[in-house]
Image (cartoon, rainbow, N blue to C red):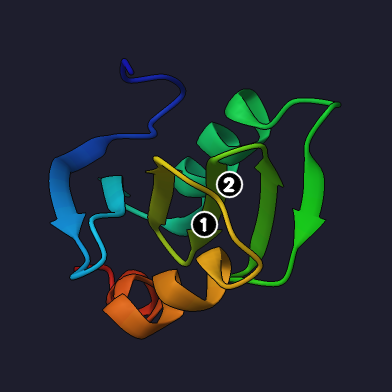
C-alpha cells in the first residue's frame, strides 16, 4: 500500500496461530496514522461477494477470509477451515481489542 492524499501506513504485522485441534489462522494487520486510512483500505479490499460481519467498525467475510477495520487498523484474517465460530475466535484472540487501541 502506498501513501495517498496524506494517508500513511505506519506498520504492517503478520501473525500465525494454531489451535490444539490443528486449525490454523493467519492474521495481517495494517496500522495507519488515522481511521481514514484503515477505512480506505477496507473499502478497497472488500468485494461485492463478501457478506457483512459484526466485528470492528465494519467487517466482511467470504469463505475462509474475514476482513475488518477498527479505528486506524485494518485486519485481514484467513482461516484454513471456516466455522460458525471463526469471527468469535478473532474476538477471543484479542485482535479486535488490539485494533481498537491501534496496536
Q: Residue at x 82, y 46 (%)?
A: 51
Q: Residue at x 27, y 68 (%)?
A: 102
Picture coordinates of residue 21, whole percent (x, y): 26, 65
Q: Is residue 79 left or right of residue 44?
A: left
Whether residue 14 is visible here, answered yes or no, is yes
The secondary structure type at the circle numbered 1 is strand
Q: Residue at x 75, y 25 (%)?
A: 47
**Label of residue 54 in the image:** none
Whether residue 32 is visible here, answered yes or no, is no
Above or below, 54 against 41 in this view is below
Above or below, 15 against 102 in this view is above
Q: Of the residues tagged 1 and 2, which is closer to the observer?
A: 1
Would you identify the image quadrant in which residue 34 lies?
Answer: bottom left
Q: Is residue 55 left or right of residue 23?
A: right
Binning the other alpha carbons within 10 Å of mark 1 as few (below 14), some (14 to 19) or many (20 upward) gives: many
Q: Which residue occupies the foreground of this view, 6 or 53?
A: 53
Q: Is residue 87 left or right of residue 77?
A: right
**Mark toward the start of the polypeptide (1 vs 2):** 2
Q: Residue at x 42, y 19 (%)?
A: 4
Labels 1 & 2 near each other (Cβ < 8 A): yes
- The residue at which mark 1 appears reads as 69
The secondary structure type at the circle numbered 2 is helix
- The residue at which mark 2 appears reads as 39
Picture coordinates of residue 43, whole percent (x, y): 67, 34
Tell me the quarter of the image containing the N terminus. Answer: top left
Picture coordinates of residue 54, whole percent (x, y): 71, 71
Amino acid at each position: 500500500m502506498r501513501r495517498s492524499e496524506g494517508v500513511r501506513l505506519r506498520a504492517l504485522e503478520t501473525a500465525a496461530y494454531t489451535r490444539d485441534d490443528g486449525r490454523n489462522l493467519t492474521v495481517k494487520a495494517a496500522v495507519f496514522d488515522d481511521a481514514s486510512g484503515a477505512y480506505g483500505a477496507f473499502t478497497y479490499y472488500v468485494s461485492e461477494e463478501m457478506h457483512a460481519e459484526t466485528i470492528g467498525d465494519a467487517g466482511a467475510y467470504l469463505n475462509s477470509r474475514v476482513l475488518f477495520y477498527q479505528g486506524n487498523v485494518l485486519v485481514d484474517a484467513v482461516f484454513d477451515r471456516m466455522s460458525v465460530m471463526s469471527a468469535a475466535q478473532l474476538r477471543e484472540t484479542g485482535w479486535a481489542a488490539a485494533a481498537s487501541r491501534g496496536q
